[in-house]
Amino acid sequence: MRMPVALALMAAPLVASACATARLDDPPLALELVVVGLRPDERAELRERLCAVEGVSDCKMVEEAPPTSTPSKKKKKGKDDEPPPPPPPSREARYTFGYRGSLGELRWHIRELPHPGLEAQRAEVRLSYRGFDNKAPSIEVLEPAPNTVVTEPVVNVTVRIPDVDTAAVDIGEEDGKKDGDYYRAAVRELPEGESTITVKATDKAGNAATADITVTLDTTPPELEVEVQVPSYDKAVVRGKVKDAMKLTIDGREVPVDMFGNFQKEVAVDPDTSYTEVIAVDAHANVRKIRRSAKIASPLSADSK
């Protein structure tokens, strides 16, 4: 008569985690399978089938525990004889293997093995510290783009940190506001010129990673010099020099600038017009405006004084 099959599944997950499925960057779970009541050929077949389960690695049968007692010699039945001792316990088959995946799915796979038709009589999970977490979180900067230039002393920062054990995220001097895998903060009071914003992500084990973001605050308008000559009452010559400008206009009309930054333009002067306006705009939309008189001074006017 075949003895019943008893099966125990023992697991030692990394860092005593209660999660059913290991993270992809974690080592496999170290598991042990103990089966009692199989013949040697069945133990070998179980090893082959267990090692073929998806997610199982480093699978081997490591020992066969010897019987814990030996049967006594047969004695003739007598009046005062003790009852015969029970038969020795079945030899057990012990398997060790690594597994990455759901423990529930593993138990289902074991139950579905066609032969010897295992059915778990107990399942034992042992939580222990088989390893340690020395991997820092990963940081992906989504905004601002590299080498961004801003014209206001504030920049919005968004980073993606997919690690499930992230404990804190610092964005510059601000605390990152969590939204799923995303963390956001507005960094204010940027100084003029180039600045480095450091993002620091720390996980529950104390591992930390940093990422630097470089931004430039440019609030300085182009340098502009303007001179106006009014040779007659209806005509004026506007000339000057500009630096770091992408566009130059005189009274709303764009004027070309040579390679040295010089410009000159003759403009018509309306008798009712008192001023001409020169505007220089740089690549970051910083603006400098200069207004100059375009009116011939009369001996009776305030401009002649």
Image: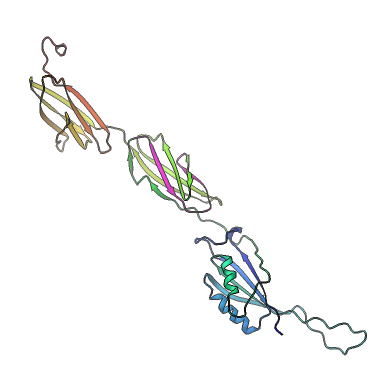
**Residue 13, x across and y down, in percent:** 59, 62
Q: Which residue is at 52% across, 71% downward?
A: 54
In which quadrant of the rendered view does residue 125 lie?
A: bottom right
- In front here: 153 or 111? 111
6 relative to 297, above or below: below
301 relative to 22, above or below: above
1 relative to 230, above or below: below
**Residue 26, x across and y down, in percent:** 52, 61
**Residue 224, x across and y down, in percent:** 21, 29
Q: Quadrant of the C terminus?
A: top left
**Residue 69, x across and y down, in percent:** 77, 79
Determine if the magenta segment contains residue 281.
no
- In front here: 108 or 175? 108
Residue at the extreme bottom of the image, as rendered: 76
- In front here: 163 or 1? 1
Q: Which residue is at 55% across, 75% downward?
A: 51
From the viewer's perspective, is 125 left or right of 190?
A: right
Which region is colored magenta?
A: 152-173
In which quadrant of the rendered view does residue 234 lie?
A: top left
Determine if the magenta segment contains residue 168.
yes
- In front here: 256 or 118? 118
